[in-house]
Amino acid sequence: MEIRGRVSQLNSGIAIPLIGFGTAAKADNIDQMKQAVDTALQVGYRHFDTASIYGTEPALGEALNHAFLTGIINRDEIFVTSKLFAGDHDDPVSALKTTLKNLQLEYLDLYLIHWPINLRKGASHPNPKEEDFLPLDIESIWRGMEQCVELGLTKSIGVSNFSCKKLGDLLSYANISPAVNQVEMHPLWQQKKLRDYCSNVNIHVSAWSPLGGFGTYYGSNSVMENPVIEEIAKKHGKTVAQVLLRWGLEQG
């Protein structure tokens, strides 16, 4: 599967590489992250996805900075996505500045609201308690996201895990439309209604956990171990992961 060169044009005017390198799973150390990023760059990855809650921004920043300094890649040749934690909704600008410091970057290509929930500062994760939840005001959060664009801290803004209803509400008051909605998507959860809606309003749908969260605390092995997908992979001489990534790629 060719990785490099496959892109989609966002409503913000920039192109997003269709295949990204996720960093939700922490590397054991920075050297391991450097090696992973170096290998990803060599095989053609140009999109790197992280989030403040993953705890991987500093290690990814070290790895990318190493790649810049050694001439492996230039900043304008890669696309970097990160996400605003639900406990930082009161000040997206400050949160993004911290993210940029962690990543050793001057700007992001894409900054997303990670979840449409609001948590108090210091809330437990990944299983917040009932008292950790606060009222959600997406409009005020979005104004902060728009300010991030106006300040040149990110080229594009978007959301993650938003339904059609929440997107519709957001579009009714947004001065800058969300460029991306990142959601879980794979053959067992195809998100057809959401993809149709987003296509009609020019929002790119990006898939997280295209392998179904295989081996993670939040996912399951049901996608990677699905007998139908295993049979398709066997028939075409591919791995199950290759079949799943191809399916996602063909959805755009």
Image (cartoon, rainbow, N blue to C red):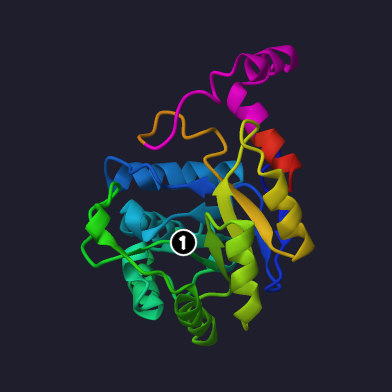
Q: Judging from the image, what secondary structure is the residue with disc 1 in?
A: loop
On the image, the x and y values in percent for residue 34 come to 38, 48
Q: Quadrant of residue 122?
A: bottom left
On the image, the x and y values in percent for residue 18 come to 66, 50
The residue shown at (52%, 75%) is: 154
In the picture shown, does residue 119 fall above or below 31? below
Circle 1 residues within 10 Å: few <14, some 14–19, many ≥20: some
Q: Quadrant of residue 190?
A: top right
Q: 225 or 86, which lies in front?
A: 86
Is the N terminus in the top left, top right, bottom left or bottom right quadrant?
Answer: top right
In the picture shown, does residue 177 fall above or below 20? below
Q: Which residues are magenta?
A: 218-244
Q: Label 1 belongs to which residue?
A: 116
On the image, the x and y values in percent for residue 231 come to 68, 13
In the picture shown, does residue 162 fall above or below 43? below
Q: 76 or 12, which lies in front?
A: 12
Identified by mark 1, the residue type is: Pro
**In this picture, residue 202 sits left or right of residue 37:** right
The residue shown at (34%, 79%) is: 94
User: Does 242 lie within the magenta span?
Assistant: yes
Does residue 6 appear in this view? Answer: no
Q: 41 or 128, which lies in front?
A: 128
Does residue 239 appear in this view? Answer: yes
User: Does 117 lie within the magenta span?
Assistant: no
Q: 200 or 23, which lies in front?
A: 200
In the picture shown, does residue 224 fall above or below 53? above
**In this picture, residue 215 sits left or right of residue 157:** left
The residue shown at (56%, 67%) is: 158
**In this picture, residue 166 sits left or right of residue 88:** right
